[in-house]
Amino acid sequence: MTPSDRTSPDALTDLDGCVETEGGVDCSALFERLDLLLDEELEPAEREQLQAHLAACLPCAGRADFETQLRAVVREKCADQAPPELLARIRAKLDMPAS
């Protein structure tokens, strides 16, 4: 499987070749904790176990690559801010006394 194959839609559901790695981490355990791993919200020992699984399991690595790329696109596309004029109008409305 090439790196570009790992982020194809088929790689997200094709679990052929999945393995259980040290610490009893299998694909379902990784999928349950993937968001926490990507958000860097895990203790170092658990993070290392999950990263070891990703290094040994191409389907899971593909899923993690896809999720990482998706997060980057969402972060980039959702970074727009409202125009200053709109923000000023909203602030003015919020400062108005209730009638």
Image (tube, rainbow, N blue to C red):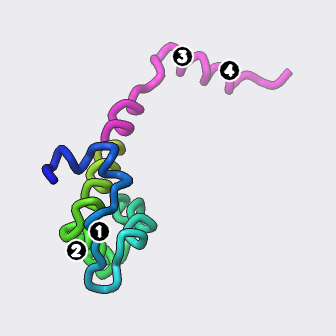
Magenta stretch in the rendered image:
72-99
Residue type pointed to by label 3: Leu
**For the residues marked 4 and 1, what is the alpha-carbon distance in whole angstroms?**
56 Å
**Residue at 26% across, 72% down:** 53
Q: Which residue is mark 3?
A: 86
Q: Look at the image and say whether residue 84 sits in the magenta stretch.
A: yes
- Badge 3 crowding class, 10 Å Cα cut-off, few under 14, some 14 to 19, many 20 or more, is few
Left or right, 90 with reference to 53: right
- Which residue extends farthest front? 16
Q: Which residue is mark 4?
A: 93
**Residue at 15% across, 49% down:** 3
Tell which circle, 4 or 2, labels the residue nearer the N-terminal end.
Answer: 2
Q: Position of residue 65 (x, y in %)?
A: 26, 52
Tell which circle, 2 or 3, labels the residue nearer the N-terminal end.
Answer: 2
Relative to 86, is 72 above or below? Answer: below
Residue type pointed to by label 4: Lys
**For the residues marked 4 and 2, what is the alpha-carbon distance in whole angstroms?**
53 Å
Q: Which residue is mark 2?
A: 52
Label 4–label 2 contact, CB within 8 A: no
In the figure, residue 75 lies in which quadrant?
Answer: top left
- Badge 1 crowding class, 10 Å Cα cut-off, few under 14, some 14 to 19, many 20 or more, is some
